[in-house]
Image: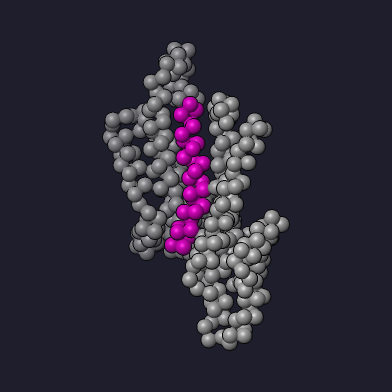
Amino acid sequence: MRSFFLRRLAVLIPTVLGAITLVFFFLHMIPGDPVEVMLGETAQQADKERLREELGLNLPLHVQYGNFLIKIAQGDLGESYFYRRPVAHVIAERIPATMELALVAFVVAGLIAIPLGIIAALREGTTVDNLSVLFSLVGVSMPNFWLGPLLIILFSLKLGWFPVSGRTGVASLVLPAVTLGIGLAALLSRMTRASLLERLGEDYLTVARAKGLPEWKVILKHALRNALIPIITVMGLQIGVLLSGAIITENVFAWPGIGTLLINAIEARDYPVVQGCVLLISLSYVVVNLITDLVYGWADPRIRLRG
């Protein structure tokens, strides 16, 4: 298991380096000067040059990139141009809100998708199954930037049940979590149904029933566990999608997380903050993929041998 972990880790490290490299160069290709954003277009040229030198923006791009990599290797994300504070501190303040939203959205998706997928597989061809397929198609088709305002109009403006925006308590978490979790629930329920259907006709289930095991144990312990690999795949990949998808949802609901910080930093041309946010999202993908691979190895030891 240790060698399996090290092999996966060695593959994932270049992924993070590639992601932050692309972001660094693409970000510097975006039109606009962060110095002008900070000082305004009417500022004196001497003041602009002084600030540009202070921020290191007067250096050649390859030198800036080299300095950026050196700081990253030292655990230094730099200082925000806009907030004039260490980027790590600015991001750390926003992480709890994003993690809270992603975790609740993931729980919402699981509570909807897993039971719905199991019931649909056990009732194949019935009305329940057809409704679950319809839910999957509709859920996957609805983008967050459309579903979020729709929920706000219905449950906030018309019914007055939940706050329109902000992070003011449990009630303010409901709408953004549902918005973020519906898409995952739709995809996950469809995958659960399809994967479980492939296992329901297997001989080992007949043997388990012949031993006198109750039906719920046959389904949950034998059929569902053997159907876990594709489900784990989707869940692992979608955790990263939740964090990146939260960018849109957070801005729709003015949720004070990484997503709103990233959009504000892009608008302000705050390069260090954008790079720090993207690095965090990239690392989240890498860590989630690594954990997913380890869970693969637990669910099916043959994967460790092949990996």
- Compared across the picture, whether 76 is left or right of 155 comes to right
Q: Is residue 248 magenta?
A: yes
Quadrant including the C terminus? top right
- Compared with 104, 229 (above or below) is above
Which residue is painted at 61% across and 69% down in the image? 60
Q: Position of residue 298 (x, y in %)?
A: 58, 30
Q: Is residue 176 magenta?
A: no
Which residue is painted at 55% across and 74% down in the image? 34
How many marks do you count on the picture?
0
Q: Which residues are magenta?
A: 224-252
Quadrant including the N terminus? top right
- Compared across the picture, whether 84 is left or right of 259 comes to right
Query: Quadrant location of residue 48?
Result: bottom right
Which residue is painted at 60% across and 60% down in the image? 276
Q: Is residue 190 something that shows in the picture?
A: yes
Q: Nearer the viewer, residue 302 or 161?
A: 302
- Compared with 239, 40 (above or below) is below
Q: Nearer the viewer, residue 36 or 97?
A: 36
Prevailing SS of the magenta stretch: helix
Which residue is painted at 65% across and 37% down in the image? 6
Q: Position of residue 172 (x, y in %)?
A: 48, 59
Query: Quadrant location of residue 45?
Result: bottom right
Q: Position of residue 250 (x, y in %)?
A: 48, 60
- Give the residue at the far top of this rendering: 210
Q: Is residue 174 something that shows in the picture?
A: no
Q: Nearer the viewer, residue 181 or 300?
A: 300
Q: How is the rendered protein coloured?
A: one colour
